[in-house]
Amino acid sequence: MINDEGSGDRHAALASDARRQVLDLLMGSATPLDAAAVAARIGLHVTTARFHLDQLENADLIRRAVGRAGTRGRPRILFTAGPAAREGGAQHDLSRVLATALAEDADSGRARAIRAGETWAESYADELRGSAAEGIAPLLSILDRLGFDPELVSAVEPASAAEAESAAGDGASDGVAVVAAPLITLLACPFRADARDAPDVICSVHLGLVRGIARELGHDPDQVGLRPFVGPELCHLHLGSEWVEPSPTAG
């Protein structure tokens, strides 16, 4: 599945709802559009529209050309959707068709979708080999390249007095901290439109992907949990406490 750098850049660019709107507008337009026209039709400030256009161009999803109007002054810069954008549209259609087919399973496709995600994770096996000591960093790197905009929110929580006393009774060192299951927020999703239509399938693929990465890094994949759409554009990824190294002891 997605593994080459160019595809990763495209998915990262499309993690923004606004950029997807800009791209959809250009794909549906019979003529090239400049930044002002894009801004007016979508309801963006022209500076914001230019930013999104630049991001889409950097991902090779759109192309620019200089308008030849035959008038004096700065030439108009016009934008059109590129071949990669058409390819992305076809991939979206394929994703929707496959998700619809899987959703006919008794469990709405969750089991097979998770297995598909785990198979996806195998494509990162060479990259992940020997990186278990890096903790969560390899997972965050892959999620970032794919356009999920991950952010590690919490990894270690200080122990309460009772927890510290219990740990000391078990022979733990002074300065003990309770290692909490890390929480990663996913602030974007390059597959959000598909996930809204078929969350049981698309979100389960993502769960399988992270579980597969966990297995490649030597962790228990069953400790991984995903809570999709805890906000309109926010998902929570929960990992087992074994992902986090204990905090340094005091002194």
Image: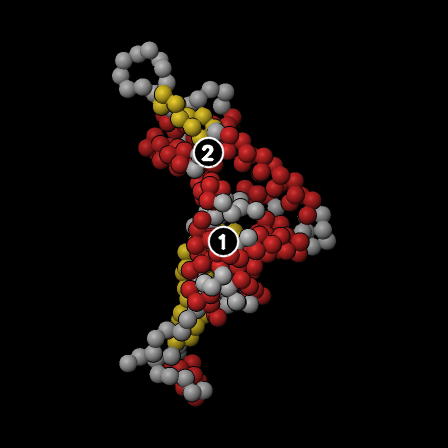
Q: Residue at x 45, y 63 (%)?
A: 131
Q: CA distance from mark 2 to mark 1?
A: 26 Å
Q: Residue at x 35, y 83 (%)?
A: 174
Q: Name the foreground residue: 134 vs 186.
A: 134
Residue 93 appears anywhere in the view: yes
Vertical side of 213 occupied by 32: above or below: above
Vertical side of 207 occupied by 98: above or below: above
Q: Residue at x 41, y 56 (%)?
A: 151
SS label for mark 1:
strand
Quadrant into which the C terminus falls:
bottom left
Classify mark 1: residues with Cα within 10 Å, few (<14), some (14-19) or many (20+).
many
Give residue 179's position: percent from left, percent from top.
43, 72
Q: Can you identify the residue that label 1 sits on?
A: 235
Give residue 224's position: percent from left, percent from top.
54, 63
Amino acid at dot 1: Cys
Vertical side of 145 occupied by 75: above or below: above
Count of labels in the image: 2
**Mark in front: 2 vs 1:** 2
Q: Residue furthest top?
A: 70
Amino acid at dot 2: Leu
Q: Name the foreground residue: 30 vs 119.
A: 119
Vertical side of 110 occupied by 161: above or below: below
Question: Which mark is drawn over residue 61?
Answer: 2
